[in-house]
Image (cartoon, helix red, strand yellow):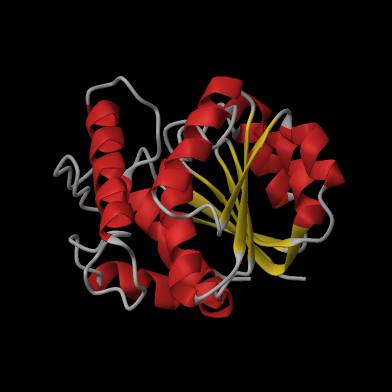
Amino acid sequence: MKRREFLKASGGAALLGLLGVLPASVTPVSAESRVRVSKNHRTAREEFIKSQEAERLAGLDFCNTRENARLLHTLVRMRRSSRVLEVGTYYGYSALWMGTALEEQGGGMLTTIELDYLRYLDAERNMRDCGLDKYVDCMNGDAHTLIQKIKGTFDLIFLDAERDRNEDYLKMLWPKLAPGGLLCVRSAVRFRYMMRLYFDELNAKKDAVTHIVGTIPDTETGDTFSTNEAMAITWRMY
């Protein structure tokens, strides 16, 4: 399948169009949202986003970039995903963006798994403080074990764990991805050599089409060139 066909079939054309017109000011706490969010929850979301982004830019945190998080938010909304899975919660930055997408569409559940117990507790508290615990279920433990216990499939999966083990995660996650679903991995360019086995596995699948999406410019740093943090988005055709 050619790139143009993938973009059309997977919604990628609409996605790229949205990225081109989506203003940088749009956030999960935008006043434009039709969802009623209490003042306390709105403030908690704003403060959490600012603190996570500040720490990441200072090199003290390894959370997702703002652009990739916005992209995940858009993908969830665009597909009207009802079941979303995240492997690698960290403190819940990406979960916040995906959780608010579910909130805005009026339903759905994000299951997010974190191996580190203390980070899991922090993420769970963050989702509760932000008023998203209705849409985000935080789990603690080894994803390889937990995912096998989860029944059903997911419309979108965000893999944000050890890059050198992505091919192992792929074997476990692919059966859990619904036909037409999306599998997303960030920093696909920066870690392309570490992830080569992952991409080899995807290329061998007849029902998988992968596209690298880089969001430029970076509204956090102002970078108008680098695509290091570009996300690999794989569409499961059937």
The one of 56 and 187 positioned closer to us in this rendering: 56
Q: Residue at x 82, y 61 (%)?
A: 152
| In this view, 96 is above or below 228 | below
Where's residue 133, x and y in %?
53, 52
| 87 lies left or right of 169 | left
Where's residue 80, x and y in %?
55, 75
* Quadrant position of the N terminus in the picture: bottom right
Where's residue 59, x and y in %?
28, 21
Q: Residue at x 36, y 74 (%)?
A: 35
Where's residue 140, x and y in %?
67, 31
Residue 22 occupies quadrant: bottom left
| In this view, 192 is above or below 105 | above
Q: Is residue 121 visible?
A: yes
| 110 lies left or right of 69 | right
Q: Residue at x 26, y 37 (%)?
A: 53
Image label count: 0
The one of 108 and 211 positioned closer to us in this rendering: 108
* Quadrant position of the C terminus in the picture: bottom right
Q: Is residue 226 visible?
A: no
Q: Residue at x 39, y 50 (%)?
A: 130
Residue 29 occupies quadrant: bottom left
| In this view, 233 is above or below 118 | below
The one of 36 and 63 positioned closer to us in this rendering: 36
| 188 lies left or right of 183 | left
Residue 23 occupies quadrant: bottom left
The one of 193 and 133 positioned closer to us in this rendering: 133
| 153 lies left or right of 159 | right
Residue lying furthest left: 222
